[in-house]
Amino acid sequence: MTNTFTQVFGGTTIYPSDVSYLALTLSADTSLEWPLESNSNENPAARIIDVTPTGSYSIIMPPADQTGTGQTVLFNNLGPQSVTVKNSAGATLLSMGQGEQWQIYLIDNSTAAGTWRVFRYGAATAQAQASALAGYGLAATGSTLSQSTPVTLFSTNYTAGATDRAKAYVWNGGLGTFTLPSAVTVGNDWFVAVRNEGTGNCVVTPQGAETVNSAASLTLAPGDSVTLITDGADWFTLGLGQSAVFAFDYTSINLAGESGDYTLTGSELNRIAYQFTGALAGNVEVVVPKTTQQYWVYNNTTGGSYTLRVKTNTQSPGVLVTRGSRAILYCDGSEVVDAETGGIATPVAIADGGTGATTANAALINLGGTSVGIAVFTAVDQAAAQSAIGVSGGASNDAIVFAVALG
């Protein structure tokens, strides 16, 4: 018959030996053991442990998933140094000063770290443990709280939730999507960081009608990173870092029915390549901010013979972009400037398809013409041509050709 060591009335495991007391001289970080895990039981997790530290060391609890819930230990620090008690994963459960008594008990053994409850005996004033105060974005470091940003790698589409506050997600797949939680649900001040370490774009998408920087989504190219924060209604980026390799951007803006000034706003700002479409209702001047930026503009509008110009709010007139054409412009912080220089340098060299000259006679010479050949080429009539090659006026055309061939 197999003895399962199960208590009939309580339903919990009964240990063959229950160690009630341990006098522990702490001269280094020490890991405790459950009584059944070792024959020697040098440092068993006893019910009561008197600790005498010789320095500021740590006591590490055994794996919680190797025992049942309800296991409890009372620690008494006999001093003179402080002692830190940690779970099996190394996270701080409590920090115990000289002369203090603390008790812990296990309430969840589904993981090796487990979930422990902690309270102090005989405290004259209440003292909160950092481990009990640590929430999302915070971690207990001894008796203090420290900022924490856990990093999670992901390669499949992911939808974030409230518990992802202060986390950092690193995309390492191809094309993927990171969906933000509802801004209304998580509330004002919730934030998360995202970085693209993958081989394709990672698209950050809000939920419903919510926007990010006034746009329906945010595309992170490989090498881009961003912290996303919410005001409880929409999303905004903080420290959007873009890789120089993938910094080129494009947008298309419909100007149908527009006339006069059209000021770029929201997600239209700080793009690089712009295509303007739609049937204009009048001449349009696109107003850009006074910030250093380049603009690759394609005027693909229709409607009448109306013009399209690009300028800053104090510039008049703007730079003309002819309909159906493309132009490279930039703003120098004050006004928009055409980056292209009109015209070509003259004279055009023969090697570049030109004549290397600025006059007809010089061009004929540069192209290898002789005095006779040039005279014939520039003759105003037949008689002048005959004279240039020394043929009398009565000679036949055949004679002239024959003479030219000989000469």
Image: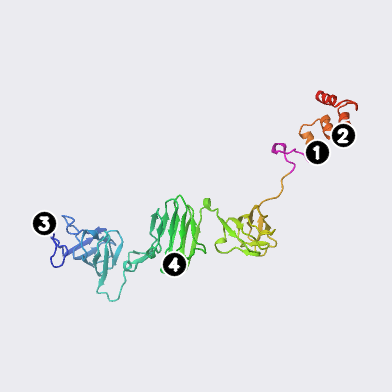
For the residue pair 148 and 343, the one nearer the viewer reads as 343
Name the residue carrying label 3: 2
Name the residue carrying label 1: 360
- SS of the residue under disc 3: loop
Name the residue carrying label 2: 381
Spatial CA distance of label 2 from label 3 is 129 Å
Q: Residue 95's spot in the image, x, y percent?
A: 29, 66
Residue farthest left in this picture: 1
Q: Residues within 10 Å of mark 1 (few under 14, many from 20)?
A: few
Name the residue carrying label 4: 183
Report the span colored magenta.
Answer: 346-362
Q: Return the disc, 1 or 2, that comes first in the chain's sequence.
A: 1
Instruction: Give the color scheme: rainbow, by chain, secondary structure or one colour.
Output: rainbow
Q: Residue 352's spot in the image, x, y percent?
A: 69, 39
Q: Return the disc, 3 or 1, that comes first in the chain's sequence.
A: 3
**Relative to 161, residue 370 above or below:** above
Question: Disc 4 marks which amino acid?
Answer: Ala
